């Protein structure tokens, strides 16, 4: 089984030395996350990677996701406080912050609840205007820059943002043939990205929402590969249910002969440390035993302390998996009944 390693590029890895070392280790795909990359930066990043590596590059769209904007450092909002949400780019504070894409303000309603990040603040909308809204803080917490947000009741956004469309156009001009669709919720979303991408492009559908899970039987066969983003999925699905949804998606991918990739928290401890935990090693092993075809490093290689070391750990885990499959370690011993005279 040829297990692929996908690495997200970011501040920790966007340099000549790390890109070269990742190339030497046989990384299969570099991912540019458009949620954290400007359209203007794409040509420069692609040029940097191509000067030091032959690894293919994938543009990963923002998709239909709500995010906050740039925040000042150490912003904490207190329960009961009021603040303004705006479509305009402002440096976020405890009294005002940006939400994007702008289209979210067309569907926000009084009473809507906005949760920012996994364990961040919770707001309730009290007033909605053109490109702006007022909110009261229900649960206080820290708000960090460019973090994903969940809106309840769920809002419907275009499958691709204007930024996504511009990025795909640039990617086509640069000769990129790998594209990932974030927050895919139906086969038609996959078809839309495929129509905008260059002919013959490889389209990866990311299932990372409850709506995507509900439509996985249509999404999986429509794509060339499927990626399970467990982090964003955990905004809408209880943590304890995610392992079972992962197995369900992988089984469908295997049935349709589509590669299945798993992302988020594979080696989360290695964002700040040099070694993983036993639990992380166990998670990787169980994912591979389920039939996953690829492992995705996100924060580990984008902002982690040792991007190359994280890839080395994955390779050791993959060799252990292949070794176990090629031995008798996973076989059940035969039982022998002893007849006592």
Image: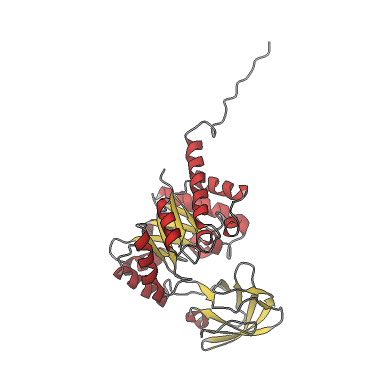
Q: Residue at x 54, y 48 (%)?
A: 284
Percent coordinates x, y for residue 103 in the rendering: 48, 80
Residue at the bottom extreme, as displayed: 130
Q: Nearer the viewer, residue 181 or 299?
A: 299
Most foreground residue, 337 or 51: 51
Work out whether residue 341 can be spotted. yes
Does residue 179 appear anywhere in the picture? Answer: no
Q: Count all numbered tags in the image, as a single digit.
A: 0
Vertical position of residue 324 compared to residue 65: above or below: above
Q: Percent x, y for residue 205?
A: 42, 61
Q: Locate the N terminus by quadrant.
A: top left
Q: Residue at x 44, y 52 (%)?
A: 5
* Vertical order, 115 against 308 (above or below): below
Q: What's the coloring here?
A: secondary structure
Placement of 112 over or under 27, stated as above or below:
below
Name the outermost residue toward the front.
17
Residue under the image location 42 percent in, 53 percent down: 27
User: Quadrant where the C terminus lies?
Assistant: top right
Residue 19 shown left or right of residue 118 in the figure: left
Q: Residue furthest left?
A: 199
Q: Residue, x 54% and y 45% (percent of image)? A: 285
Q: Is residue 256 above or below residue 51?
A: above
Left or right: residue 194 versus residue 294 is: left
Where residue 144 sits in the image (x, y, percent)? 60, 73
Q: Nearer the viewer, residue 338 or 140?
A: 140
**Residue 105 x %, y %:** 52, 82
């Amino acid at each position: 089984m040829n297990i692929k390693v996908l690495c997200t590029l970011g501040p920790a890895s966007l340099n000549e030395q790390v890109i070269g070392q990742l190339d030497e280790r046989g990384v299969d795909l570099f991912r540019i996350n458009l949620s954290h990359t400007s359209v203007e930066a794409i040509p420069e990043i692609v040029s940097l990677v191509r000067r030091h590596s032959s690894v293919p590059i994938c543009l990963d769209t923002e998709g239909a996701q709500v995010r906050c904007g740039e925040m000042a450092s150490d912003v904490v909002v207190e329960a009961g406080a009021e603040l303004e949400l705006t479509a305009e780019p402002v440096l976020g504070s405890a009294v005002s912050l940006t939400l994007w894409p702008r289209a979210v303000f067309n569907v926000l309603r009084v009473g809507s609840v906005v949760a920012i990040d996994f364990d961040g603040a919770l707001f309730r909308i009290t007033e909605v205007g053109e490109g702006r809204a007022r909110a009261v803080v229900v649960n206080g917490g820290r708000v960090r820059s460019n973090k994903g947000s969940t809106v309840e009741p769920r809002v419907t956004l275009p499958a691709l943002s204007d930024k996504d469309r511009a990025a795909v156009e640039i990617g086509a001009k640069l000769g990129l043939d790998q594209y990932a669709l974030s927050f895919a919720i139906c086969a038609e979303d996959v078809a839309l990205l495929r129509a905008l991408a260059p002919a013959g492009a490889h389209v990866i559908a990311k299932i990372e929402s409850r709506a995507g899970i509900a439509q996985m039987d249509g999404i999986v066969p429509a794509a060339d590969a499927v990626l399970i983003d467990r982090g964003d999925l955990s905004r809408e699905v209880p943590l304890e249910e995610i392992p079972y949804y992962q197995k369900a998606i992988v089984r469908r991918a295997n049935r349709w002969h589509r590669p299945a990739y798993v992302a988020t928290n594979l080696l989360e401890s290695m964002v700040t440390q040099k070694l993983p935990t036993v639990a992380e090693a166990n998670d990787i092993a169980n994912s591979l035993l389920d039939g996953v075809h690829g492992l995705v490093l996100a924060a580990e290689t984008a902002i982690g302390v040792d991007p190359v070391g994280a890839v080395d750990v994955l390779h050791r885990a993959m060799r252990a998996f292949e070794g176990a499959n090629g031995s008798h370690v996973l076989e059940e011993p035969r039982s022998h009944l002893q007849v006592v005279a």
